[in-house]
Image (cartoon, grey):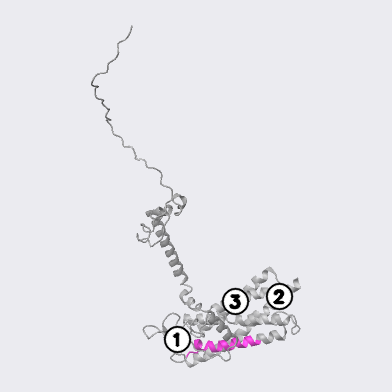
Amino acid sequence: MQRPGYAAPAHSPPLHHPVPQHVSSVPQLRSPPPPVPPSQPASGYGYAQQPQGGPSGPAGGGGGSYMHPAFGGFMNDSTAQMGVQFGKTAMMAGQEYVEQNLNRFINVSAIKHYFNVSNSYVVNKLWIVLFPWRHRPWSRQQRLSNNGQEGYYLPPREDINSPDMYIPMMALVTYILLSTLLAGLRGAFTPDLLGYTATSAFTVVLLELLTLKLGTYLLSISSSSQLLDLVAYSGYKFVGVILTLFLSETFNRTSLGTGIGGTGGWIGWVVFLYCFGANAFFLLRSLRYVLLPDQGSSVGAVGGAAASYTVARSQRSRRTQFLFVYSYVVQFAFMFWLSAGTGAEGGKGAEKV
């Protein structure tokens, strides 16, 4: 049986597309970034190079400093800024606390004055300490403050006659190291020799400071700046002691000496007596303005105002005697202790070996 053919209608009905009832937003997808041309190198760690005129560049008020994106967010964080500010505040408070407690015992600002030196000052000062015979003048230079009424002494950098603490401190350390070195060259070095030499040197310094403190009390010297000047002058004897040890050891190893360390041999005694005389003459000339000031002269405190005072005739006589005893008797005893003590200790070490 044959089916009849299908005949298409003359007009087909229109097509109806479904209309969605819930519209969903689909994110817009972008293609990968274009490749970087060879003339422009890519930035490290996958971050793009920030332009110079951006917010962190000069145009953005950032001072021209570029901050990496990985750290820019951290520094801009309010918590990080609060932590940095807290650390600065704590550091400033700790520094202020240390300075306040340290100033109770030591005037730090006054001590800084004695370390204000230069290379030319150190060389010229060492020459004056060793060869003070023809040096002129010995008076210290003063400068008026802004108001024109108060005066103060110039620092060592600007005045060759000003005392300093740099040379005495370096001379003390050099004395300790040179003494142990010479003992090692003689084959008498022992591990406890360094401690013995340092203890001996600090004992001399402590005894001399006690002597100066007693002298300032008996002579009614109450100015702290004058006491610091005396402490500074007391350390210059280490320069002569170092020269005595070095030259004595050098000449005693030749046929001119006896081979004994310290001041052994006539060469050592000649050098020691010369250094002692030069140091005594240097102290007599330098300490005159401290212990025997001119009538009505202005002696300025370190970094402070000047104080005018006069010295009575009886007080002036006692200060003259103290100056003579300190410059000759006290210095001879301490310099001989430091010079001969090293040789004696080296001899004992050599006998033990």
Q: Which of 74/233 is in front?
A: 74
Q: Which residue in the structure is indicated by mark 1?
A: 142
Label pair 2/1, CB-CB below 8 angstroms: no
Q: Which residue in the structure is indicated by mark 2?
A: 346
Q: Nearer the viewer, mark 2 or mark 1?
A: 1
The residue range painted magenta reads 273-293
Residue type at mark 1: give it: Gln
Q: Secondary structure at mark 3?
A: helix
Q: Is residue 209 magenta?
A: no
- Is residue 239 found left or right of 248 in the rendered image? left
Residue 27's place in the image compared with 343, above or below, is: above
| Label 1 CA crowd tier, 10 Å (few <14, some 14–19, many 20+) | some
- Is residue 195 found left or right of 7 in the rendered image? right
Q: CA distance from mark 3 to mark 1?
A: 29 Å
Q: Position of residue 240 (x, y in %)?
A: 62, 83
Q: Secondary structure at mark 2?
A: helix
Say which mark, if any, is on residue 111: none
Q: Is residue 292 magenta?
A: yes
Say which mark, if any, is on residue 172: 3
Q: Position of residue 293 (x, y in %)?
A: 48, 89
